[in-house]
């Protein structure tokens, strides 16, 4: 007995322990936390292990999914690895957004930093759509300062052809997906299926969706990119020589030396510090801008050996306007100063016939033209998108055409700050705000290199001539009335496009619409319409009409139907009949069907065009036994009406049924019809 009691107690304890474990598990699983990613190109997996290779990589829209530095994620739970993945023991089950879709997956916990959930002191004037982003940044970096700049612009103003949609104003590199490029006029040659390069044969106009993504501050309010909003004024406390050296690592400027105007040999990093002091512009911005413009290995702008401009330098590519030879354009500015006043040429150290003068004098030009100018373009963002100026006529005033430049340069600056260990300093960020911004952050187009061309190269109708112009989508032809079908053929400009709607097309008389649809490789559709008119047949005029009956007798409640015949029967005129009754209290008519209402007479008229025919209707209130059709006489026709009634071919009114009940037994039967036959043959003398 005691042994059984012990077992029962042990069982209860085990069950209680299991319930506690399950309860704890669910409580832990339900506790969602916000985190951010600390490295780039982190693979997202469908299960917590790397041992399955690519088999458990998360795929979305046909592509492997990555998360990158600064991306915010919701951590649903932290779990142990599976499949013996001892190298990555802890994993985070995350939920995150990608191009508008909400996805879930697993990444190793080492690349996720949980954001402390403590409350932060939010700055004044934070727009509602920015609050979540600013709160997360302040939880990570409480010393950062945020200022919100109301540009006064409506969001939808920014993408017109006079703003960022202006051809050549917002450029994307050739290395990025075709789906990012604009196909607007001047950006893409539809007839020849070619993209139009707008700078150095390597830069193309970005489409509206791509521009919207890079203009939407929410996409960059994270640790990786937020420095595109940093104030670019020189700050001697934060902008140190060591920081510049970090930015220059791996570039042609890392350890090389140049000569100052006084003949002193200094490093490039020291030159940028001197440039910052002279121009009041951040040396981090200056160093990053040079790498952004000429690359880590430099270019013809920095070699001093460019043909026709030997001995001249332009580190910031100032004046390197778009065209067939932007480097030459920039070096010409370095040599002459362009339209600068004499005073400004002196301030900018024109000509730039040394690396030092190009760096320091170019920095002054940047400060004078952008950062310290009336345009107030004192962030990387505003230098690309000049929305800090209230006059939209100055949208053109931008330092770079590269739409990605602010993001790229901000990463270099952030990394330099990180290497210096000063990320917790009191940086100030100026965040632009626009009226009527979308509720959700704008997304990039789906990444693909699928051809967008949905134009036709040719369109023809066999046996007929059309003046085809691929830019026009509507054509009209007329064919004879004897043509029953036509053969439509077409070919697309791009071989990967699909065409539907061609082949042998049956025609009806009059108007026919044939839609030839071209579906591009990227699924965009364009419809070409053929309006084919089949000539009308020879007109055959109507010369008269007739009715199947000229007079009808009915009992009250009875019905009969009139039909119209046309002369000639193949007339092409309208055959629409208008029916009227001279006395609707006696008889009504609808589509030729007459209904007897009350005793009396009425004239039913059928009218087609200018022709009319009439039928006299007599409605009888009483009934005569055997006279089922109410014509006043008992005939074989009355007997036949009984047969039709019995087979369901005809209905009879109440009085007609009484007339049909010739044997007066209360039923209408074939025997009643037989009595009529006997009466007519004289076999019986009366009904």
Image (cartoon, rainbow, N blue to C red):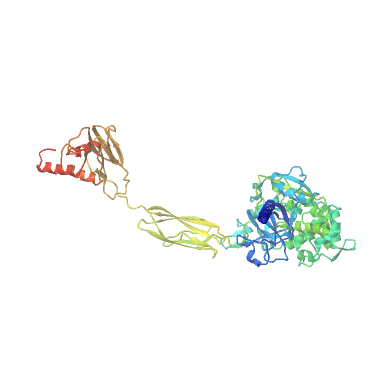
Q: Residue at x 90, y 63 (%)?
A: 264
Q: Residue furthest front?
A: 1
Q: Position of residue 492 (x, y in %)?
A: 52, 63
Would residue 507 be found to the left or right of residue 662 on screen?
right
**Where is the N terminus found, in terms of image quarters?**
bottom right
Image: 365 above or below 497: above
**Where is the C terminus found, in terms of image quarters?**
top left
Q: Position of residue 587 (x, y in %)?
A: 27, 35
Residue 351 visible: no
Image: 557 above or below 354: above
Task: State the count of labels.
Answer: 0
Would residue 396 be found to the left or right of residue 532 on screen?
right
Q: Nearer the viewer, residue 214 or 17?
A: 17
Residue 291 visible: yes
Q: Nearer the viewer, residue 402 or 589?
A: 589
Q: Nearer the viewer, residue 70 or 281?
A: 70
Would residue 583 be found to the left or right of residue 479 on screen?
left
Q: Position of residue 665 (x, y in %)?
A: 19, 38
Q: Residue at x 67, y 67 (%)?
A: 51
Would residue 684 be found to the left or right of residue 341 on screen?
left
Q: Position of residue 669 (x, y in %)?
A: 20, 43
Q: Residue 206: name its quadrant.
A: bottom right
Q: Residue 151: name its quadrant.
A: top right
């Amino acid at each position: 007995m005691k042994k059984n009691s012990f077992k029962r107690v042990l069982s209860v304890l085990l069950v209680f322990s299991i319930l506690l474990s399950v309860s704890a598990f669910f409580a832990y699983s339900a506790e969602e936390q916000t985190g951010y990613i600390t490295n780039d190109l982190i693979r997202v997996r469908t299960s917590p292990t790397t041992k399955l290779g690519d088999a458990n990589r998360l795929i979305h829209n046909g592509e492997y999914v990555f998360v990158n530095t600064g991306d915010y994620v919701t951590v649903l739970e932290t779990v142990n690895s599976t499949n013996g993945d001892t190298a990555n023991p802890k994993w985070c089950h995350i939920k995150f957004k990608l191009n508008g879709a909400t996805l879930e997956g697993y990444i190793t916990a080492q690349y996720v930093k949980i954001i402390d959930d403590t409350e932060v002191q939010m700055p004044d004037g934070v727009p509602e759509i920015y609050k979540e982003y600013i709160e997360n940044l302040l939880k990570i970096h409480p010393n950062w300062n945020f200022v919100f700049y109301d540009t006064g612009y409506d969001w939808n103003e920014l993408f017109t052809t006079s703003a960022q949609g202006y051809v050549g104003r917002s450029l994307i590199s050739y290395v990025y997906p075709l789906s990012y490029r604009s196909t607007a006029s001047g950006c893409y040659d539809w007839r020849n299926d070619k993209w139009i390069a707008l700078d150095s044969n390597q830069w193309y106009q970005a489409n509206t969706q791509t521009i919207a993504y890079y203009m939407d501050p929410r996409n960059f309010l994270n640790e990786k990119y937020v420095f595109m909003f940093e104030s670019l004024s020189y700050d001697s406390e934060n902008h140190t020589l060591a920081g510049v050296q970090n930015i220059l690592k791996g570039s042609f400027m890392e350890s090389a030396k140049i000569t100052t105007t006084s003949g002193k040999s200094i490093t490039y990093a020291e030159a940028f510090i001197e440039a910052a002091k002279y121009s009041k512009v951040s040396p981090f911005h200056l160093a990053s801008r040079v790498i952004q413009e000429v690359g880590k290995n430099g270019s013809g702008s920095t070699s001093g050996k460019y043909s026709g401009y030997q001995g001249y330098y332009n580190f910031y590519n100032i004046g390197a306007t778009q065209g067939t030879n932007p480097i030459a354009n920039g070096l010409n500015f370095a040599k002459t100063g362009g339209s600068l006043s004499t005073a400004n040429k002196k301030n900018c150290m024109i000509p730039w016939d040394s690396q030092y003068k190009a760096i320091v004098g170019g920095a002054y030009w940047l400060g004078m033209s952008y950062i310290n100018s009336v345009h107030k373009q004192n962030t990387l963002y505003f230098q690309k998108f000049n929305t800090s100026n209230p006059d939209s006529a100055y949208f053109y005033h931008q330092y770079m055409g590269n739409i990605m430049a602010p993001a790229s340069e901000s990463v270099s600056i952030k990394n330099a700050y990180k290497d210096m260990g000063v990320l917790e300093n009191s940086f100030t960020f100026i965040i632009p705000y626009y009226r009527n911004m979308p509720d959700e952050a704008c997304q990039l187009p789906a990444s693909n290199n699928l051809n967008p061309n949905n134009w036709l190269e040719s369109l023809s109708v066999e046996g007929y001539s059309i003046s085809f112009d691929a830019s026009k989508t509507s054509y009209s032809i007329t064919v004879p009335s004897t043509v029953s079908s036509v053969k439509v053929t077409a070919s697309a400009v791009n071989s990967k496009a699909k065409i539907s709607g061609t082949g042998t097309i049956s025609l009806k008389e009059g108007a026919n619409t044939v839609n030839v649809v071209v579906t591009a490789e990227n699924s965009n559709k364009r419809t070409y319409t053929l309006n084919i008119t089949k000539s009308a047949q020879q007109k055959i005029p109507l010369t008269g009409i007739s009715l199947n009956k000229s007079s009808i007798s009915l009992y009250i409640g009875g019905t009969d139907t009139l039909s119209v015949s046309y002369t000639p029967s193949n007339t092409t005129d309208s055959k629409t009949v208008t029916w009227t009754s001279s006395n609707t209290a006696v008889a009504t008519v609808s589509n030729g069907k007459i209904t007897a209402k009350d005793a009396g007479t009425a004239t039913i008229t059928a009218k087609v065009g200018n022709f009319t025919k009439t039928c006299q209707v007599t409605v009888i209130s009483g009934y005569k036994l055997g006279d089922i059709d109410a014509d006043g006489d008992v005939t074989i026709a009355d007997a036949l009406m009984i047969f039709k009634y019995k087979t369901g071919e005809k209905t009879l009114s109440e009085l007609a049924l009484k007339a049909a009940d010739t044997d007066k037994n209360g039923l209408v039967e074939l025997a009643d019809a037989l009595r009529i036959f006997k009466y007519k043959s004289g076999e019986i003398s009366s009904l």
